[in-house]
Amino acid sequence: MADKVDLEKQKRNIEEPPRTPSSMQSPAMTSEGSEFPRDSVADDQTFVDTPGSPDEVDAPGEPQLDEKTERSQYLVKWDGPDDPENPKNWSRAFRWYLTMASGLLILNATFASSSPSGVLPQLIERFHLGHELAVLTISLFVLGYCCGPLIWGPLSEQYGRKPILLVAFFIYTGFQVGSALAKTTAQVLIFRFLGGTFAAAPLTASGAILADIWDADVRGKALAFFTLAPFAGPALGPVVSGYISLGGASWRWLFWVLTMFAGFCFFVILFTVPETYAPVIHKRKAIRKRKETGDDKYFSELEAEDLHWRQRLEKVLARPFKMLIQEPMLMAITIYMSFVYGCIYLLFESYPIVFTEGHHLNPGESGLMFLPIFLGGILGVVIYILYFNPRYEKLIPQHAPRMVPPEERLKPAFLGAPMFVIVFFWFGWTSYPRISLWAPLTSGLFMGCSVIFIFIQMCTCHE
C-alpha cells in the first residue's frame, strides 16, 4: 500500500507543473539519504514522515485548501525552489536590511510608549492632573498594544504585511500630531490610546516579516536582533524626554519628535519594504498570469477561499481568540510574557522615585539610568548568538527529518526566568537613598539580559 501511494505521488508530481510551498527553498537530504524539501527540516520545522508532494506542507496562517484545489495545475505558487519572487530567495544583505527595518518600526512604537515619563511634571502642571491620571499617558498607550494585534495580525494574513503597516503608520502619525496639539486631558489620553492601538501593527507584522524571509537556522539570529528593539525603545524614551524637559522645551515638542520619527518610518515602509507574505505574492502572480495568458483559470490560494465578507470578518477577528483558547501552551506563554513586559513598564514609575527623588538626579540624568537595561539586552543578544544559537543549529541535522524538539529553544529561558526574579529583588533591596545608586543601576544590566533570554525563546519555541 505504501509503495502504491508513493507511485501515485510521483505520477502527480510528473504530470503537474512543479510547485512549492511559500516557505520552500531547496532540497535537503534526510538522514536516510532520501530527498525532500529543505523547509520541512530546517525552516518551518514541520514534521514529515515520508517524502511527498511539497505542497502537503502548509505554513502557519496560509489558507487551507481542499485536495482537489491543491492538485489543480492552475493554482499559482512558486516557480520552483529558486523562484526569485520567493522572499527567502532574496539576497542575504537585503533580508538583513528588512530585519533591521522591522526592528526600527518596533523601536518607534516602544520608544513612543515610554517617552512621556520625562515630561509628566509638565503635563501635571499644564492640565492640573493627579499623578495617577498623568501615568495613564503611558498605560493607555500600552493598553493599545493589547487591542491592536487582535486586528493587525489576522488582517496581515488577508491583505499582506505592507498595506497593514502603511495604513497603521499613516494613522499613527496623525495621532502623534493630535497629541502635540491637544488642548484637554481627554484629548491627550484618547490620542495616546489610539496611537498605541495603531502603533501595535509592527509588533505583529514586523515579526511575521522575519518568518517570511528567514529559514529557521538563521531566524534565531534575526530574532535576537529584532527582540532587542522592544527594550531599546522603552530605555531610550525617558532619556530623550528627560533632556527635552531639562532643556526647558515644552512637552509638546516631545510629541513633535514622535511625529517626525513616525513619519520617517512611514516613508521607510513606503519606499524600501516590499510585500513578503507568500499568499499575497501568489495572488499578484496569479493576476499577472491571467493578464499575460488571457486565461482566467489561474488562481491563488487566497482567491480559492472565496469567502463571504461576513465569513472573512469572522475568520479575521475570531482567529486570535480561537488560538488562545485551543492552545493551552500559547495561553501560558502569553500570560508569562505579559507579566514580564508589565514588570518592565513598572520601572517607569519606580526609577524616577529611586533616582530622581531618592538620589536627587535631574530628569535627564534619571533617564540615563534606563540605559543599563538596553546594554543588558545587547549583552543577552551577544551571548545568544555566540553560545545558544550555535548549539541549536547543531541539533537540526541530528534530528532531521523530524523537527528539533521545541524544548531545545527554551534552554536560555531556563537561565533568564530565575535571573529576572533575582534582579527585581536586587533592585528593590538596593533602592534606598542611603545605598549607592550604582547598586540599583547595575541591576538593570542583568535585567535586560534576562528579558532577552526570556523573550527570544518564548517567541521561537513554538515555531
Image (tube, rainbow, N blue to C red):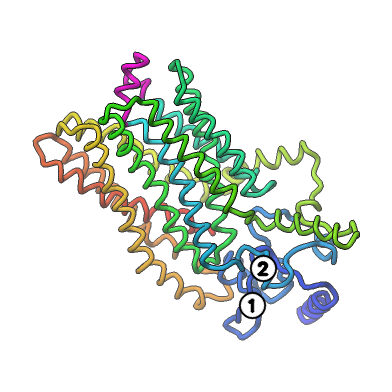
* Magenta stretch in the rendered image: 118-134
Name which quarter of the figure residue 276 lies in. bottom right
Q: Whole-percent x and y of residue 108?
A: 45, 42
Residue type for callout 2: Pro
Q: Whole-percent x and y of residue 264?
A: 50, 43
Residue type for callout 1: Pro
Taking the spot 33% from the left edge, 53% from the top edge, the residue there is 377
Q: Residue beneath label 1, please?
A: 27
Contact, mark 2 vs mark 1 (Cβ under 8 Å) = no
Q: What element carries label 1?
A: strand
Taking the spot 58% from the left edge, 61% from the top edge, the residue there is 213
Name which quarter of the figure residue 298 lies in. bottom right
Please state, as top left, top right, bottom left or bottom right, where the C terminus lies in the image.
bottom right
Please state, as top left, top right, bottom left or bottom right, where the N terminus lies in the image.
bottom right
Q: Main secondary structure of the magenta part?
A: helix
Check if residue 126 falls in the magenta segment.
yes
Q: Whole-percent x and y of residue 49?
A: 65, 73
Q: Residue 84 carries which label?
A: 2
Q: Vertically, is 409 above or below 308?
A: below
